[in-house]
Image (tube, rainbow, N blue to C red):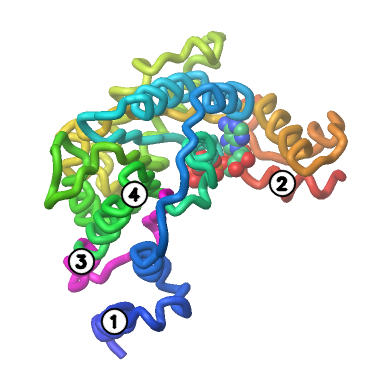
Amino acid sequence: MKVTQIYLLLHLILTTSVLVDTLSVTGFMSNLWKRLSFQGSCDSLKFNAEGLRADLESKLFGQHIASPIIQKAVTGFMNDDNPKKPLVLSLHGPTGTGKNFVSKLIADNIYKKGMDSNRVHVFVSTYHFPHPSQIDIYKSQLQEWIKGNVTKCERSMFIFDEMDQMHPGLIDSIMVYLGYYHKLDGVSYRKVIFLFLSNAGSKVIIETALKFWKEGREREAIELKDVEKDITESVLNNNLSGFWHSRLIEKSMVDFFVPFLPLEYGHIIKCVMAEMKAKGLELNQDVAHSTANEFIYFPTFERVFSVKGCKSVENRMKFYI
Ligand SMILES: Nc1ncnc2c1ncn2[C@@H]1O[C@H](COP(=O)(O)OP(=O)(O)OP(=O)(O)O)[C@@H](O)[C@H]1O
């Protein structure tokens, strides 16, 4: 069967909602139909500004630039009953530095059910490689998905993970919802939060962190202005990035580009301790050090920054408990 035929067949099946629950392999589209068909009311909101501040301060390690930006941006937005545009945050940084984790902290402090709320929607770009002949179908499905969910619950949150891998056509189809429109086709998107997560710009962020370290300067001396311009430039100049082709950045639809710095040995220790606490285990510094030592760091000799941040702490820790 040709690829085009497979796509057409998939589309046909997907429009038959009876079969939707069996189609986990087609993630987004089945999710789309499930989401659009959820019955009943929107899950409750419980915005907790103090909770968000405390979580960012105590649970997110090593992100002194990201933490206050996210706290102020989300708090200001949630306390505004009449925002002029949706809140659009683009989180950038190397793997395992807390971009998904922070999305969870935001959801936990806005929605009673956190990430399980029917107001929270996740789109993982790498799961969706539309065939060129199907791009228009995907675009309208994506738009329907956003529109349907926002029509049901206006205080919704959309998380687009691996944004740098997203098809530029799909990015453009989201763009329309990010601007200063009062209403589009009868629907207001002004109370929606869009989070874009990506590794785009990581090189610049890592180079800056390395530069400060080599110069013997404190990590905390790195400021947003040291990386912000370079992040947007590197994202725009990267041929492989979906951002590059889209007009998302040019049109200033993104409210904040939020850098996530590479994590150091001390942060990995904190991640292990947090994991022990979450599992109800007795806190054990020896286990934390043994686990942190297992990680790969760069530069190779000095071992300053963890290559994978705090990723797989949980699995590695198991060897020592
Ligand atoms: N800065 C951090 N503070 C506390 N915990 C962290 C931090 N970074 C990562 N973690 C821990 O590591 C896990 C993996 O991190 P996370 O999924 O947030 O990485 P990411 O930045 O989204 O990576 P990727 O770019 O690969 O998607 C988190 O669930 C969390 O437990």
Upstream in sequence: badge 2 or badge 3: 3
Task: Calculate the distance from the C-alpha at mark 4 to the C-alpha at mark 3.
Answer: 27 Å
Q: Which mark is residue 314?
A: 2
Q: Which mark is residue 3?
A: 1
Q: Residues at badges 2 and 1 in contact (C-beta under 8 Å)?
A: no
Task: Calculate the distance from the C-alpha at mark 1 to the C-alpha at mark 4.
Answer: 36 Å
Amino acid type for the residue under numbered disc 1: Val
Give the residue pinned by disc 4.
Answer: 153
Ligand 1 within 8 Å of disc 2? The answer is: yes
Q: Is residue 247 visible?
A: yes
Amino acid type for the residue under numbered disc 4: Cys
Q: Is residue 41 left or right of residue 187?
A: right
Q: Secondary structure at mark 4?
A: loop
Upstream in sequence: badge 3 or badge 1: 1
Q: Residues at badges 2 and 3 in contact (C-beta under 8 Å)?
A: no
Upstream in sequence: badge 4 or badge 3: 3
Q: Work out whether residue 294 or residue 221 is closer to the camera in this orientation and state it.
A: 221
